[in-house]
Structure formats: structure tokens, C-alpha cells
Amino acid sequence: MSLGEITQLPKNLALNTRCSCGSPIRECPLWATVVDRLAAHPRFRAIRENPYVLDLGLFEAGTVIDEKHQTRLRRAWRKAVYAGAYAHWRSGLKPLAAFAHPLLRGAHNKWRLFEVLTSLEPRLLVVDSSKHYLEAAALYAAEPQRTRILFLIRDGRAVFYSGLKRGKSPRAALDAWRLTYERAEPVLNRVVNSRDVLHVRYEALASDPAWELQRICGFIGLRYERGMLDFRTRAHHVANGNDMRLQGGAAIRLDEAWRTALTASDLEYFEANAGSLNRRLGYR
């Protein structure tokens, strides 16, 4: 069961955005039933009136934003929590452990949500695509025996080009990617058992999805079936994520436009500021 960026589910409930099945999320048969089940729990009793009682972690939406919730103060608080949690998990210093508590609280609530979902639609696996490495560390810390992490990697030059194309400055286009990968590996290496992490390259997945999916299935202990590649054959209930979830296509295409679009000066800037990191991730 693919859940998409499930950390943002409270926002989707608050704004009543569309589920990938096509229905407004409060009218979606699956999510409406999930809300009913959660409302029976004392901690989430007020979920219909205030979806944010279902605290699934810290998120910062980039496109669909609940302005009443994603305030400047909350963004500042999120940055402070992330900085402290990173320092705690990176160094192991116990005085900083309090910073990880909001993330761990969100992770425990996610596990409660997962249990409700799997009671409604029997599944061996739920996939959370919330993406942030600290959210992944918290989810693993909450339930290490039941959590496996896919560490997604893409050539930094492609991400850099994507940022420039959206009008970002070179520094802004590069920093989110650079800082994520500089920080993610040390944290995951410290918090997560190495056997529970699989590195997945975007380029390998897009070039040969069948082969890469077989490798992922082997890692998580599922039998690979060819039908897995045709994910449009059944309805999904992805609450938040890329807009492709609302479209009809299923093709996976490799996008390497950066190879011809980046200028010589762009490549020089990238090399000076992130070339060594990109090579450490396996790109030449």
C-alpha cells in the first residue's frame, strides 16, 4: 500500500485535497473510514475538527500550503527541532535527545495509523514516501524490527538543474541536495542497522525499473511480480505527493536533460561546491 508523503496527511484532511483515487480526501472511502477509526482513539478524538491532532511529524509543504498552520513561527520551530535532532543522532549526545521527541512522537502516531490501515486492507507492506532522512530515522527508531529504509539517490547535477529551471539561485538550487546528502548518511549510519538500508539510484530505477524493483523486493522480502510495474491497474489512495498520482500515465522515463542544459559555468559552480560529494555518491 503506497501512502505517498503521509507526514502531510493532517494538512490534506484540513484542506480536503484530492486523494489519488479521485475523491476529496474526506469523502474517499478508505480515508473516511481511517478517520472514523482514529476518532475512536482518545488521542485523536478531535481529528474531524482539528486534523492536526494526528501529529505525524514535521513537514513543510512547498506547493499546497495550509497558511493557517504553516506559519513563520512553526517553520522556525521545525528548523530548530531538525537541527537539534540531527545533532543528537549524529553525535549521540544525550542532552540533545529532547529535540528528537517531536519526531519520535510523529513516528509512533504513524505506526498507529499504519495499524489502522492494515486492519482495513490486509497488506504486508506500507510505503511512506515522506522523504526526509530525519523522519526516516525516527520511524526506524520507533520500530526497528518492522522498518526498512530505501535511501534514494540522484545525480546532484540533475537536481541542481531542476532548481535552476525553477528560477532558484545557484546556491539555493544546490544547497538542499548537498546538505541532505552530507547529513543523511552519517545519521542513518549511526541510527539504522546497515542491513536495513538499501541505496536506490534514480537513474537505475528509471533505466530498468523491472530489475531495480526485483532488487527492492529481495531487500524487503517480497516476491516480485511483473504486474507491480503496471501500478495503474488498481486504485491507490495516495494522499500527498507529486501530481503524477492524479494522472493516468504509468511510464517511467529517465530524465537527464541536465547533460545538455547546464552551461560550462553551471558545471564549474557545481564541481567547486559539490563535485566531491557527487563522486562519493557514485557519480562521475
Image (spheres, rainbow, N blue to C red):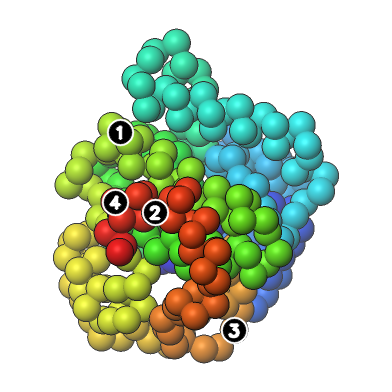
Q: Indicate which disc, 1 or 4, sits on the residue closer to the N terminus.
A: 1
**In terms of sequence position, does the residue under pointer 2 or pointer 4 come before the other?**
2
N-terminal of the two: label 1 or label 2?
1
Residue drawn at point x = 38 percent, y = 86 percent = 230
Of residues 56 and 169, the one drawn nearer to the viewer in this rendering: 169
Q: Which residue is mark 2?
A: 275
Label 1 crowding class (10 Å Cα cut-off): few <14, some 14-19, many 20+? some
In front of the other: 87 or 160: 160
Determine the secondary structure under disc 2.
helix
As shown in the figure, which amino acid type bears the numbered disc 3? Gln
Query: For residue 247, which numbered disc appears in the image?
Result: 3
x and y, in percent, of residue 236 in the image: 50, 74
Camera-side mark, 3 or 1: 1
Seen in the image, is 214 located left or right of residue 174? left
Q: Which residue is mark 1?
A: 191
Which quarter of the rendered picture does the N terminus lie within? bottom left
Label 3: how many residues lie within 10 Å, few (<14), some (14-19) or many (20+)?
few
Question: Which comes sooner in the sequence, label 3 or label 1?
Answer: 1
Q: CA distance from mark 3 to mark 4?
A: 36 Å
Residue 199 in view in this figure: yes
Secondary structure at badge 1 equals helix
Quadrant in which residue 65 is drawn: bottom right
Q: Dot 2: within a 10 Å radius of its alpha carbon, few (fewer than 14), some, or many (20 or more) residues?
A: some
Residue 135 x %, y %: 46, 42
Mark 4: few/some/many CA within 10 Å (<14, 14-19, 20+): few
Give the quarter of the image for residue 57. top right
Q: CA distance from mark 3 to mark 2?
A: 36 Å
Q: Comparing marks 3 and 2, which lies closer to the viewer?
A: 2
Q: CA distance from mark 2 to mark 4?
A: 9 Å
Q: Which residue is mark 4?
A: 280
